[in-house]
Amino acid sequence: MAVKIRMSRGGAKNRPHYKIVVADSRYARDGRFIEKIGYYDPMLPKENDKRVVIDVERAKHWLSKGAQPSDRVTLFLAALGLAEKPAIRETPKKSAPKKKAQERAKEAAAKAEAAPAA
């Protein structure tokens, strides 16, 4: 059984409220879960203590059992010192201009340098 620590959405339309739960990864996002270990209220200001509340002891217990936190929950746990903060990913090389576009940019730069000198 693959256990994850993730968020389960609740609340009304445009007024989200999330439970932080431990659940089998095969269950639906808002479906069955093993244990609720906290909650997250994104509608509160960032400075508010009640914005993210996690039971630290239970989180440590599930992490020791091998539960994998989701990306967002990892950030919450990192703020509490229970997990390592993930590295910021760089822009993928796929999105860089291709060879022809790079050549055109070099030619345009060369023309721009030559034009003011003349």
Image (spheres, rainbow, N blue to C red):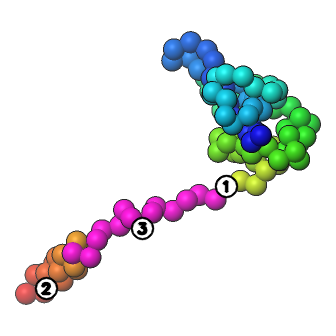
Q: Secondary structure at mark 3?
A: helix
* Residue 3 in picture, x, y percent from top left: 76, 39
Residue 33 in view (yes/no): yes
Of discs 1 and 2, which sits in the foreground?
Answer: 1
Q: For the residue marked with disc 3, what is the amino acid?
A: Lys
Q: Secondary structure at mark 1?
A: loop
Q: Which residue is mark 1?
A: 86
Q: CA distance from mark 3 to mark 1?
A: 20 Å
Q: Check the image and report above or below for 48 versus 65.
A: above
Q: Which residue is mark 3?
A: 93
Q: Quadrant of residue 71?
A: top right
Disc number placed over residue 53 in the picture, else none? none
Of discs 3 and 2, which sits in the foreground?
Answer: 3
Q: Quadrant of residue 30?
A: top right
**What are the residue bounds of the magenta stretch?**
87-100
**In this rendering, would 92 be left or right of 113?**
right
Label 2, residues with CA under 10 Å away: few <14, some 14-19, many ≥20: few
Q: 77 or 35: nearer the eye?
A: 35
Q: Check the image and report above or below for 50 versus 75.
A: above
Q: Is 90 within the magenta?
A: yes
Q: 100 or 22: nearer the eye?
A: 22
Q: Which residue is mark 2?
A: 114
Q: CA distance from mark 3 to mark 2?
A: 31 Å
Q: Secondary structure at mark 2?
A: helix
Residue pictured at 22% horizontal, 71% vertical: 101
